[in-house]
Amino acid sequence: MRRLEQVTTPFNDVDVIERNDGGIDFDVIGATHATWHPTHLLTGHAWDAITAGAMMHPGEPASLLLLGLGGGTVLRQIRHFLPHIHIRAVEIDPVMIRLAREYMALDELDVEIVETDAYDFMNRDQGKYDLLIDDLYRCGERDVERPADVNRETVARMAEKLLPGGTLIMNFVLGRGHARLHRRAREAFAHHFEAVRAVRPPLSHNEVLIGAERADGLRSPRQLNAFKAFLNHDQDQRYWKELRNLKLR
């Protein structure tokens, strides 16, 4: 591996790493904040679980709001499965946007990018969406952290941005220092939504929560598994198959 660039911003300390297999990683405090490979789509990490959450929407979603663009890893996956969906992505860090364009082919994804604080955007945005993905993490002193708590009020406010039949998707880091917030988030999803799933990827300590208003508002694991046929590489298909899909409600 070799370091291509190192940047420090008010929000992130990022190492841009070129891997031996030709892929690119954005590393933040020892964690990979975004990844890109010229031929492989899936990663075995949280982005795959977020994409699975998007594909649980039972219809053909036409609009997506992503809070926390990063390098656009998950958008590359979603664009593959949903080539016609309109994507709006909110990112506070202009340097991250620049890195994503330079190293991860962001401009090929046809994304409307809003450079601002995600919570400020939510307060003033009048739009509603079929899919809302919250993947907001930033550098803490020793680990990545969410910029704000996740509780019943948070989930209810985000659910208000959904169109009828819409899906809310939130990514959570698991493990030491993250357990309390994760428990509150699970409780908030169970309180607000009739259908709640949790998806865990095979290679990282993350859990993605997915909620829908109706009990029949999410595709079943069997229906979700069928999307494996859309993937062209054996490794991508294997990572899709290895996602753990848990029914919480």
Image (spheres, grey):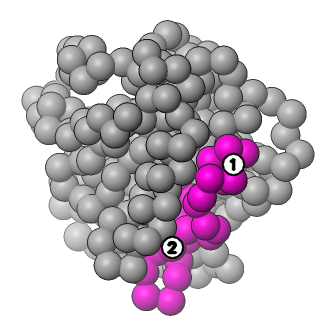
Question: In which quarter of the view is residue 175 placed?
Answer: bottom left
The spot of residue 198 in percent (x, y) is: 34, 42
Q: Which residues are magenta?
A: 135-157
Eyeballing the image, is 21 above or below 219? Answer: below
Considering only vertical position in the picture, is 240 above or below 80?
below
Q: Amino acid at mark 2?
A: Glu
Magenta run includes residue 144:
yes
Q: Residues within 10 Å of mark 1 (few under 14, many from 20)?
A: many
What separation in Å lies between label 1 and label 2 (alpha carbons)? 18 Å
Find residue 235 and report its image quarter.
Answer: top left
Which residue does the image show at 32% across and 57% down from the upper left?
206
Query: Is residue 70 located in the magenta-colored stretch of the structure?
Result: no
Look at the image and tell me whether residue 76 can be seen. no
> Viewer-proximal residue, 213 or 102?
213
Q: Is residue 206 above or below residue 191?
A: below
> Residue 90 shows which numbered tag?
1
Q: Is residue 121 left or right of residue 9?
A: right
Residue shown at the point (25%, 36%) measured from the top left: 245
Residue drawn at 64 percent across, 68 percent down: 148
**Percent x, y for residue 53?**
41, 33
Q: Quadrant of the C terminus?
A: top left
The answer to the question of whether label 1 and label 2 lie on touching residues, with beta carbons closer than 8 A, is no
Question: Left or right: where does residue 172 sit relative to residue 130?
Answer: left
